[in-house]
Image: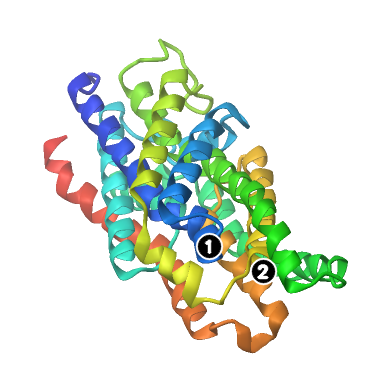
Amino acid sequence: MSSPPVELIVLIIGIALVFDFTNGFHDSANSISTVVSTRVLSPKKAVVFAAFFNFVAAFGFGVAVASTISKTINLAMVPTDTIPFIVLAALIGAIGWNLITWYLGFPSSSSHALIGGLAGAGISAGGVAAVKLSTVTVVAQFMVISPVIGLIVGFFFMALVLRLTRSHTRDKMDHHFRRLQLVSAAAYSFSHGTNDAQKTMGIITPLLFSIGYYGAGADPGHLPVPVWVILAAHVAIALGTLSGGWRIVKTLGYKITRLRPVHGFAAETVSAGTIIGMSVAGIPVSTTHIISTAIMGVGSTKGPGAVRWGIARNIIGAWIMTIPASAAIGFAAFWLLSPFI
């Protein structure tokens, strides 16, 4: 079969970077909600701060997550000229769900939206055999595990911080933790870049494979990520962060629980450590899930009534719906695109 037109590949790469941009503005709230709600930084300064650390993460922890994403579709089981349409349909599924949840103000997962879109498009293209279920299974497992880690570790880390600072007055704690929160917010934004920007890299590499970018005999299971792809993905997510996501800032920063600088510091520190660990292991996790449950865990140290669990239930409902909803959109999108292959 002939290779897909280069112009088509360029168009889809552009759409992939748009997805990365929407990931940035959708997830920018995760990076800045705590630091804004505790008034450590103004909203404008916070988004610039977060965007900077999203970008410098390009020089951080390798591309293990990108490698995992690129293996969601079993490239050996689908025709080469079909790959671009699978990726395009997956992007339609992911972007569509991102925009729906952004409009509704739900902090759902861009990562799971992309995995769902890929799975739905892949099944539409070549049946279940076209999807590496082992990859989808790992993502689904950590969809449950990573938020639980955020919740539990957030609670105990916050309890430890409060114990260590019990002799300090509230004003003194706020003074010190306002400064420390700049460090934790930077770490969280950096960790967000190490995981989320790589997801776009992981869907661009199959596109390059489909046009012979890697040369004859390239192993579709081990595709290296070019430097220009790494930089482009991080620029896109940083620009998206600069655009802000104010609807979700309100949900995360104000509606779940009221935060002081010490709470923001604890939630961001726990989230950053968890996400960076997952990035090193090559596991694409939801940064949204982790920061949301870390905030819940931190807030619950003030008592169960300090967390608005009704809001939390709505957020969890959006999480559960993400993979099947984006998969359905991706499946339908490939079906609509298939006459053009």
Q: Which residue is mark 2?
A: 151
From where the camera sits, is residue 316 visible? no
> Dividing the picture into quarters, in which one does residue 17 lie?
top left
On the picture, is 316 further left or further right than 142? left
Tell me, for residue 39, which label it has, or none: 1
Vertical relation: 253 (above or below) 120: below
Colouring scheme, one of rainbow, by chain, secondary structure, one colour:
rainbow
Closer to the camera, 172 or 239?
A: 172
Q: Can you say which quadrant of the picture contains the N terminus?
A: top left
Closer to the camera, 49 or 212?
A: 49
> Dividing the picture into quarters, in which one does residue 112 lie?
bottom left
Residue that protrudes farthest toward the bottom in the picture: 305
Q: Can you give x and y, in whole percent of width and height, for residue 327 in the image?
A: 35, 57
Q: Can you say which quadrant of the picture contains the C terminus?
A: top left
Q: Can you give x and y, in whole percent of width and height, for residue 277 in the image?
A: 69, 45
> Dividing the picture into quarters, in which one does residue 162 lie?
bottom right
First in sequence, mark 2 or 1: give its number: 1
Q: Residue at x 75, y 65 (%)?
A: 172
Q: Select label 2 or label 1 by which is in front.
A: 1
Tell me, for residue 104, which label it has, or none: none
Q: Can you give x and y, in whole percent of width and height, for residue 34 in the image?
A: 55, 62
- Amino acid found under the numbered disc labelled 2: Leu
On the picture, is 211 further left or further right than 241? left
Q: Residue at x 78, y 69 (%)?
A: 156
Q: Residue at x 34, y 42 (%)?
A: 21
Vertical relation: 294 (above or below) 214: below
On the picture, is 31 further left or further right than 6? right
